[in-house]
Amino acid sequence: MPELPDVELYKHRLDETALHRTIAVVTVSDARILRDLPAAKFAEAVEGRRFEGSLRHGKHLLAKLDKGGWVTLHFGMTGDLVPCGEKSDEPPYTRVRFDFADGGALAYTNRRMLGHVGLTDDAETFLRGEGLGPDALDPAFDRAAFAQALGSGRRSLKSALMDQAAMAGVGNIFADEILFQARLHPETKVAQLTDKQTETLFRQTKAVLETAIACGAGSEQFQGQLPQGFIIPQRKKDGRCPRCGTAIGTLKAGGRTAYFCPNCQKPKA
DNA sequence: TTAAGTGTTGCTCT
DNA sequence: AAGAGCAACACTTA
């Protein structure tokens, strides 16, 4: 699930269920998710500590430890963060579990293991090291910054939106939605945009991400909560454009499938 | 049985 | 040199 709106929901879960509670036990049930960090070292750094704050940047979530340092969470394609009770109701594919001294736990799950849990001393340094551009929902990421992030190049809008070094947070699904709402073909080149289209793309980038958060992205019922007129529920075989009823088209870009309406999102002139 | 998939990296080719 | 294409990672589902 996790693109920016999904990770924002995970942040809310962490804030509501885990903040300021002493972490008694850390269980790493699959150490591959820690990469080179020994599980014992990770547990030692976190056990006895509390999370005293959290920060989301793009698709990354960082939880601040009370005695300094941060736990870093990245979710890949199949990661999730789930509050749970005792071990009996631990969700499948739990890779790391934080058990609180006063009961209950927070589970980091990841079916495909595409993701990472780690430690860092400094959030800024970590994010810089990941090579991330500005968070797409940062208020400071304004129209001018957006235009700058897109660059002037010959690259397609879809790849520009998904480039985490340009702007952090947009992935394959929400890139499709943003382009649909802006009525732009995914293979349109950045250099082809008029000023007005750049403005529209900027506004839709913010609006789509904010709407997705408001609709509970990352939750089970998410698609059902979306307003009429979103293409996301139609990203499937036999999907229909919610605006004109045309059969949804697909194309491959960068090894990912783009879903779009061939009628509403005509290729450039 | 084969293929595709919400992410990222690293390598190759142009 | 920027950008596209592709395989790899691990695992499930259509």
Image (cartoon, coloured by chain):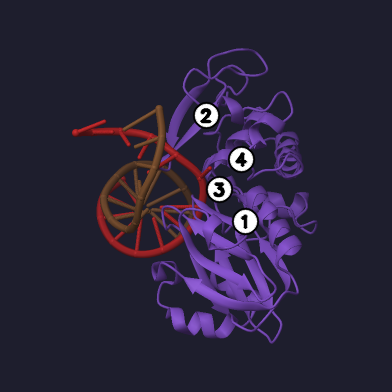
Chain colours: A purple, B red, C brown
Q: Of the two numbered discs 2 and 3 on the same chain, state the one appearing first in sequence.
A: 3
Residue with the mark numbered 2: A259
Q: Helix, strand, or loop for circle 3?
A: helix
Q: Of the two numbered discs 4 and 1 on the same chain, state the one appearing first in sequence.
A: 1
Q: Amino acid at mark 4?
A: Phe
Q: Helix, strand, or loop for circle 1?
A: loop
How far apart marks 3 and 1 lie (CA) works out to: 8 Å
Residue with the mark numbered 1: A168
Q: Amino acid at mark 3?
A: Met
Q: Which residue sits at x=70%, y=57%? A: A13
Q: Are marks 3 and 4 on the same chain?
A: yes
Residue with the mark numbered 4: A174
Asked if one can make out residue A135 in the rendered structure from this viewpoint, the answer is yes
Q: Helix, strand, or loop for circle 4?
A: helix
How far apart marks 3 and 4 lie (CA) works out to: 9 Å
Residue with the mark numbered 3: A162
